[in-house]
Amino acid sequence: MLATRLPGILPAMTEKEALESAAIQSISFKGFKLKNWQQRIFRAPHHTASGVALVGGGSQPQPGEISLAHNGVLFLDELPEFDRRVLEVLREPLESGRIVISRATRQAEFPARFQMIAAMNPCPCGYLSHPNGRCHCSSDQIQRYRSRISGPLLDRIDMHIEVPPVPLKDIQSTTSKEESSDTVRERVVKAHQRQLQRNKHSNALMNTQDIKLFCQLDKSGALLLEQAVSRLGLSARSHNRILKVARTIADLNDEDNISMNHISEAIGYRRLDRGYPSS
Ligand SMILES: [Zn+2]
């Protein structure tokens, strides 16, 4: 449910983004529908989808789900249930924003810059550490399930968040204080504009040079990140991704400098680097 809400809080598409998105959809089997113009697309392929359906291919190369989700959202529910080889193919587009499909006779390249959201359970049955005690998964089963997500793939996911069960009284509450998507979107748009003014593109697209320029830390922030990197054994890639997330948190707070709190919050979103939740 959270994932389906994401397109509703994203900034409006630029004409260039809308044209790219429409062009890819127009060459797919289903074609482009005018009602989708300038709408950020939400794709949620099933875990039984084939490699070709997901990343593209075929004798006349067709764009796959990752290209159809270009400039939009790709939601992969039950991530460990996807074919592991297919998941590994995602590593390239997650870095480069494009996918090259090579066939004996021809080669095709499609754009694939999508916002990926993935969901997984803590164990095959999904009830590990749940207060109802219904989980009877063996540690072997749990290990096998989790190992389907490789370290390098995990490295390319900016934020890992544990979502505990929502208490029944909160589901039934009629006096909820939740914000509407429109309110959240105003904040997102403002933070996005800050990024465009400063970097000329969104924080996600910052290269190493941009990171050096725009993600400078004060002494306490630098020390905290250094400690996290050595304690959790983080890669250079994770290090840079934490900096980008911290930069975005600062932007959402309308602040020019990244503080220790921003860095600390960004490190907190690397849940799976700290090991999986255990029973
Ligand atoms: Zn279980």
Image: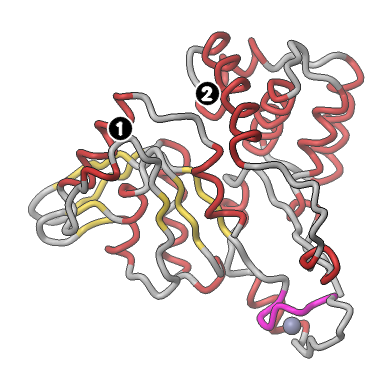
Q: Secondary structure at mark 2?
A: loop
For marks 1 and 2, give the CA distance: 17 Å
Outermost residue on the right side: it is 220
Which one is in front, 135 or 183?
A: 183
Ligand 1 location (quadrant): bottom right
Amino acid under label 1?
A: Ala
Residue pictured at 55% horizontal, 66% vertical: 79
Does the Cβ of the disc 1 residue fall within 8 Å of ligand 1?
Answer: no
Q: Quadrant of residue 93?
A: top left
Q: Main secondary structure of the magenta part?
A: loop
Task: Give the magenta range.
Answer: 123-129
Residue pictured at 57% horizontal, 21% vertical: 208
Quarter placement of the N terminus: bottom right
Q: Mark 1 or mark 2: which is in front?
A: 1
Q: Quadrant of residue 245?
A: top right
1 or 2: tag closer to the N-terminus: 1
Which one is in front, 214 or 240?
A: 214
The answer to whether residue 225 is above or below residue 41 is above
The answer to whether marks 1 and 2 mark residues whose Cβ atoms lie closer than 8 Å is: no
Label 1: few (<14), some or many (≥20) within 10 Å?
Answer: some
Q: Is residue 232 magenta?
A: no
Q: Which residue is mark 2?
A: 202
Q: Which residue is mark 1?
A: 18
In percent of width and height, residue 252 lies at 70, 25
Quarter placement of the C terminus: bottom right
In percent of width and height, residue 9 lies at 56, 38
